[in-house]
Amino acid sequence: MSTSSKKKDTAGREVVSLDSLVQQKRDALPDPTTYELFGVEFTLPPMRALPWEIQEKVGDLNDTIGVLAEVLGPDKVKELYGVGIQLGDLEVLALDWQKRSGLESGESGASSSS
């Protein structure tokens, strides 16, 4: 199978497969980033690699802190609480995560409406 998108005729209608195009996009994503914050180590995938279910659970990928909590899971969040993490610390983490994910600041962060 070639890497270009393929068309097939299904019952008289054209169906365009996006599989190879999607795979190329996935292959171009940055690697996950491992962070250390006050002795707590955790790894975050690029934001564009997050499963769709996370947006359904959190409600909005613009809620970076909610997305972080969902990705890290309750045990890691509890560990971060234990080292006294503050909201400002999470903002620093969220901005760096966006940058390393290849997103512009605000593209997945705070809403641009005022």
Image: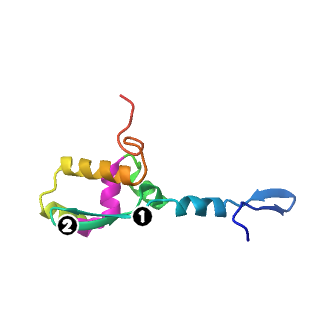
- Seen from the viewer's position, the closer of residues 24 and 50 is 24
Q: Residue sitting at 13 percent across and 64 percent down?
A: 82
Residue 108 in picture, x, y percent from top left: 40, 46
Of 36 and 109, which appears nearest the observer? Answer: 36
Decide: few, some or many residues near mark 1? Use Cα within 10 Å; few <14, some 14-19, many ≥20.
few
Nearer the camera: disc 2 or disc 1 = 1
Query: Which dot marks residue 31?
Result: 1
Left or right for 95, reference 103? left
Q: Residue furthest top?
A: 114
Residue type highlighted by circle 1: Asp
Which residue type does callout 2 highlight? Answer: Val
Magenta region: which residues? 63-76
Give the x, y percent position of residue 110: 35, 40
**Residue 16 shown left or right of residue 89 in the figure:** right
Res. 54 image quadrant: bottom left
User: How far across and how far down the image is residue 112, in percent?
Assistant: 39, 33
How busy is the neighbourhood of tag 2: few (under 14 within 10 Å), some, or many (20 plus)?
A: few
Q: Secondary structure at mark 1?
A: loop
Q: Which residue is mark 2?
A: 40
Marks 2 and 1, the one that precedes in the sequence: 1
Which colour scheme appears in the figure?
rainbow
The answer to whether residue 70 is left or right of residue 17 is: left
Q: Residue at x 42, y 64 (%)?
A: 31
